Image: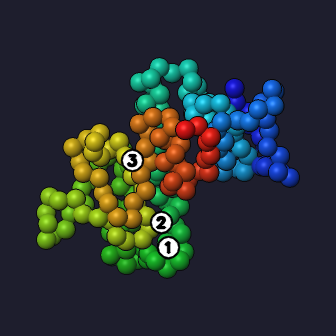
Amino acid sequence: MRFRNHHAGCCGFNPTRPDGSEWTHVLTLHDGSTVHADTPEEIIEELVPGFTSLDEQGRLRARVRLSERVAAASQEVRINAAIAQGILDPADPDSAALIDVLRADKGQSMLLETEDDPGVQAAWQPEPTLVLLATRYAPHTDYPPVTGNVSYIDPSTDAALLASLNRAQIFDYWTSAT
């Protein structure tokens, strides 16, 4: 069962199920409304209409597509914030090169290397945070994960996706499930 609260948490309103019990999962959307649900799948259904009717392979593909879109959008917000704060200057060649790396296709794995250590994954140090998909790196692929100032979105399972969206500060998600 799923419920969408369009009151944006107005006056501490926390809807309950018809039997009076509390929801297990809550996601706050960017419009301020909240989605209350019994399962992670029902939460994702709000983001990907038709999600719960897909088979497991279809769900995985849908989570990956959603993750790629959300990662790219989140990355762009971070780039724009860094430009506004004076951290990045698109007119500067070094900043422009960083922006190109930040805007790289989120559906592809990335190998960051230094001149001193070619072929070895280097840590991402600059601001802003680099947003990547966990399933494009080990243990899902042969590419070692990028370390450093990185947020990973993990579409491997429904629960992993929602938890990673929360960790990356893309959506506010809460669950009482253990």
Chain-order first, disc 3 or disc 2? 2
Query: Percent position (x, y) of residue 12?
Result: 82, 51
Q: Nearer the viewer, mark 3 or mark 2?
A: 3
Query: Percent position (x, y) of residue 28?
Result: 67, 47
Task: Report helix, strand or loop for mark 3.
Answer: strand
Q: Is residue 65 visible?
A: no
Q: Amino acid at mark 2?
A: Ile
Q: Amino acid at mark 1?
A: Ile
Query: Quick check: 89 above or below 134?
Result: below
Q: Residue at x 44, y 48 (%)?
A: 153
Q: Residue at x 49, y 59 (%)?
A: 76
Query: Quick check: 47 above or below 143?
Result: above
Q: Amino acid at mark 3?
A: Leu
**Considering depth in this image, is 156 or 31 the residue closer to the camera?**
156
Q: Residue at x 44, y 39 (%)?
A: 155
Name the residue at the right extreme: 11
Q: Would residue 112 appear left or right of 20 to someone viewing this image?
A: left
Crowding near the residue tagged with mark 2, few <14, some 14–19, many ≥20 C-alpha atoms within 10 Å = many
Task: Report helix, strand or loop for mark 1.
Answer: helix
Q: Would residue 141 appear left or right of 133 to someone viewing this image?
A: left
Task: State how far apart marks 2 and 1 are (Cα).
Answer: 6 Å
Task: State how far apart marks 1 and 3 are (Cα).
Answer: 24 Å
Residue receiving disc 1: 83
Chain-order first, disc 1 or disc 3? 1
Query: Quick check: 91 above or below 23?
Result: below
Residue receiving disc 2: 79
Mark 2 touches mark 1? (CB < 8 Å): yes
Q: Residue at x 70, y 35 (%)?
A: 23
